Amino acid sequence: MMNNNKITINKEFDLKYHIDVVKLNIKKLYTENIYKMKYTYLLGKEMDSLNYFRISKMNGLVVVNWDINLRVIDENNTKIELVCLIDTHTNNIAMSTLNSFLERLVMLLEGKEDTEIIETTNKGCMGILVILVMGLGIIYLV
């Protein structure tokens, strides 16, 4: 019998941007081809009047789904809440996926260029690839 222990990851931040700007940039991450093809964020559900999104991403063999709730703090500030319900054994994958999404969103909000966002967020992947190739080389030599 499988162990179905679930945990909830809840991240909440105050952003110094108007809610419409935040919504526009969230939508950019799952609609614009440069991001859609690169990061494969998928929209599960959007309720514009409730400032709600459900986003998912396939990360390896694990599908990570999370809810995004936005609330107006004042004219130029927005509270963003991300909630993700996952199996305990996928905790690290889910945290990494949420952190990457937030990193890209913040870079968009700060006005970074698309190419700069992609270059910056790819650096970790190249390091992992180099380590993997080196590891395979050592195994081959032995």
Image (cartoon, rainbow, N blue to C red):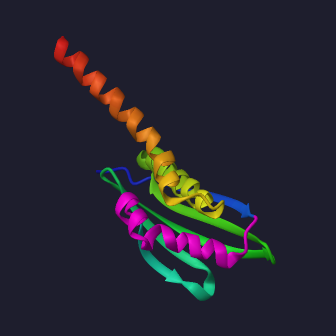
Residues 98 and 34: in front is 34
- Which quadrant of the figure has residue 105? bottom right
Q: Position of residue 132 (x, y in %)?
A: 31, 29
- Outermost residue to the bottom: 49
Give the total of numbered labels: 0
The residue under the point 51% across, 74% down is: 27
In magenta segment, residue 27: yes
Give the left or right position of residue 7, taking residue 59 as reference: right
Give the left or right position of residue 115, taking residue 112 as reference: left
- Which quadrant of the figure has residue 36? bottom left
- Which quadrant of the figure has residue 25? bottom right
In the image, residue 53 sits, relative to residue 16, either above or below, namely below
The residue under the point 52% across, 49% down is: 95
Q: Position of residue 11 (x, y in %)?
A: 63, 57
The C terminus appears in which quarter of the rendering?
top left
In magenta segment, residue 33: yes
Give the left or right position of residue 122, taking residue 47 as reference: left
Residue 23: tell me if it is visible. Answer: yes
The residue under the point 57% across, 85% down is: 48
Give the magenta part as a residue range. 16-40
Residue 63: tell me if it is visible. Answer: no
In the image, residue 60 sits, relative to residue 44, either above or below, namely above
Q: Position of residue 35 (x, y in %)?
A: 42, 63
Q: Main secondary structure of the magenta part?
A: helix
Residues 52 and 83: in front is 52
The residue under the point 23% across, 24% down is: 136
- Outermost residue to the right: 74
Q: Position of residue 88 (x, y in %)?
A: 46, 48
